[in-house]
Amino acid sequence: MKKKHAVLAATTLAALSLGLTACAPGAESAEGTASATCPDGKIRFGILPYEDPERLEPAYQALGAALSEQLDCPVEVIITEDYAAEVLAMENDSLEIAQFGPLGFVFANQRADATPLASFGDADGNPTTYTGGIWVPKDSKIQSVEDLVGHTLALGSPGSTSGDALPMSALADAGIADQVTADYAGGHPEALLALVNGTVDAAQINSQTLATATAEGTFDESKFRQVWKSEEVPNDPITVRGNLPQEFKDAVAEALLTLKTEDVEQVSAFLGVDPAGPLIPVTVDTYQPLFDLAETMGLTEKDV
């Protein structure tokens, strides 16, 4: 596949020398007393930048504040610069907990023994999923993945499940990976915008971004067509670092699973979960299809 790598625009200051941005609910520098639920005086909660960080921040501050109250420990929300920075931060013991994309979790599990604790349930408490997709203008001659030969395709960010790996897999399966010019737009919203502005022939748009953009009025679905759709992908896991005490892991799991729907509904909305429900338990097995995808495509953390 022909790829042009775009550098993500910096929207906030870097921290920890890992491209991290911190925003703690309440007093940003406050630290609590060390305890079983607060082993280092605070809990650092990593978030991947799947949307504009300025939009994600208030949603995760609400979740972080609720978690802080449950654990009696300050929670510092850290939105990482990119997908790779989040994996590296957990590997380097710079995060205690983190929400990873499904594919990012594969590498975090392999490198930092990240353990999935919870994901985002629907109003009935059932697991939720999303799909990757490739979209074109309604009047485009492109009718299928095979028709993308010789055309431009906007991807999201390197290492993204639906913004990179899944559309890459679709092109590879069709045997046309070397005949499509794919350009990293810098994120899911940016890829959608590239299609809306007519700067590319096609773009990856997952069901989460589609729901958000449609609700906000930034995407008119009647003017575009979906020419490819992935299988269902389990929603993002919230994980804990593997080398932390089991007592802490158990406490975090219990706290996450007892949060109220209103504590997580802002985040759930970004993930296409509407109406929102509580967080629900997940395991490594939940994400086995992503481990299989990484193995089939020969992906490693370097691809993030």
Image: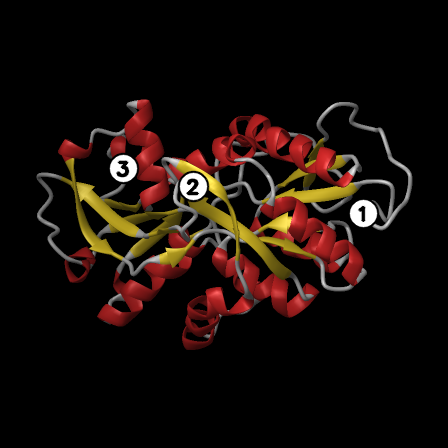
Q: Is residue 242 above or below residue 278?
A: below
Which of the two discs, 2 and 1, sits closer to the camera?
1
Give the number of the disc on residue 37. 1
The color scheme shown is: secondary structure
On the rendered structure, is 153 left or right of 70? Answer: left
Q: Amino acid at mark 2?
A: Leu
- Quadrant location of the C terminus in the rendered image: bottom right
Q: x and y percent of residue 118 in the render?
A: 56, 52
Give the number of the disc on residue 271. 2
For disc 1, the neighbor class at 10 Å (few under 14, some 14 to 19, many from 20) is many
Q: Amino acid at mark 3?
A: Leu
Which element carries disc 2, helix, strand or loop?
loop
Residues under labels 2 and 1: Cα distance? 28 Å
Q: x and y percent of residue 152 in the render?
A: 27, 49
Residue 85 in view (yes/no): no
Q: x and y percent of residue 68 in the render?
A: 73, 35
Who is closer to the viewer here, 202 or 121?
A: 121
User: Residue placed at 78% from the left, 54% from the top?
Assistant: 248
On the rendered structure, is 2 left or right of 267? Answer: left
Q: Which residue is mark 3?
A: 195
For disc 3, the neighbor class at 10 Å (few under 14, some 14 to 19, many from 20) is many
Who is closer to the viewer here, 183 or 193?
A: 193
Quadrant in which residue 228 is drawn? bottom left
Q: Earlier in the sequence, mark 3 or mark 2?
A: 3
For disc 2, the neighbor class at 10 Å (few under 14, some 14 to 19, many from 20) is many
Q: Earlier in the sequence, mark 2 or mark 1?
A: 1
